[in-house]
Image: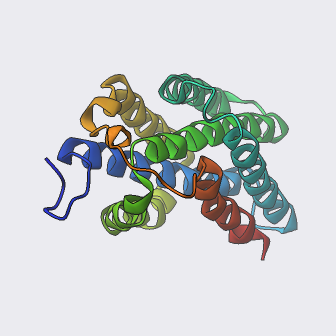
Amino acid sequence: MSVLRNGILITKRGFLEITLLFSFFFTLYFIFSSLIPIYIIPPSNDLQIIQAAINFEFAVTLIVNSFFADRINTLGLIRTSSVATIIMSVFLFLAPNDVLKIAILFVIGLFFSLSLSCFISHFWKQTVPEERGRISGLIGFVALPFSFVVALLIAPNLVFFETIMLTILVNLGILLIVLLKPEKGVIAAKNRDVNYSEKRTVLLYSVPWVLFSLVNVTL
């Protein structure tokens, strides 16, 4: 059963899971790249440098990992990265000085980038090329308002401890969805006997995230 009666080959459950994952990842992106550095370094040129460096780390990791998308267990890596992010978030709160907090934040950024690239790969694998634009538009229409409310209205009003708890809860949400094996909620559209003149890779769908990461705080 499709989401809408227009031939989109994705189940309602699959659409809901991907939408929730997108919302969670976008929320975490804002928290890790923009919000948490403010708790560590007061607004200054140094803060902008740290934020730019984190976004650059996101961009590089997305590009590099995209070349290995077909060789890795994407859901398994999302699980591992989510658990690692939760553990490192606890260490981030308990770190005794700002230098160590910055180092831990970059480690978190690496794990988060890996899980984000795996999510993009998972979305790519579960949709057929001619439907990705429509499905992406529907997901963005639902997920972006949720992410903006959480990331721009709620999260900035939290103290450092509450922000860490929010990141842990969001990662637990990602972990729960992945443990429920979301691939079973999506119709295996690739089984259709259709030949495509162009084979797109997950790299194409990483480009918007890369560009957004680089432009977000560097300009």
In this rendered view, identify the residue nearer to me: 25 or 187.
187
Residue under the point 40% across and 31% down: 172
> Residue at horizontal 54%, vertical 58%?
197
| 19 left or right of 64 in image | left
Query: With 87 as the anchor, is 194 left or right in this view?
Result: left
Q: In this rendered view, identify the residue nearer to me: 128 or 100.
A: 128
User: Which residue is at 56% across, 38% downward?
Assistant: 118
Quadrant of the image occupied by residue 180: top left
Can the viewer see residue 161 in this picture?
Answer: no
Task: Tell which residue pokes out farthest to the bottom in this image.
Answer: 219
**Residue 212 x, y percent position in the rendering:** 65, 66
Residue displayed at 61% across by 64% down: 208
Quadrant in which the C terminus is drawn: bottom right
User: Residue 157, image x and y in percent?
Assistant: 47, 61
- Count of residue discs: 0
Looking at the image, what colour scheme do you see? Answer: rainbow
Residue 211 in view in this figure: yes
x, y (%) of residue 205?
A: 58, 56
Nearest to the observer: residue 17 or residue 186: 186
Residue 62 rendering spot, x and y as whole percentages: 69, 47
Corner quadrant of residue 11: top left
Q: Is residue 44 left or right of residue 160?
A: right
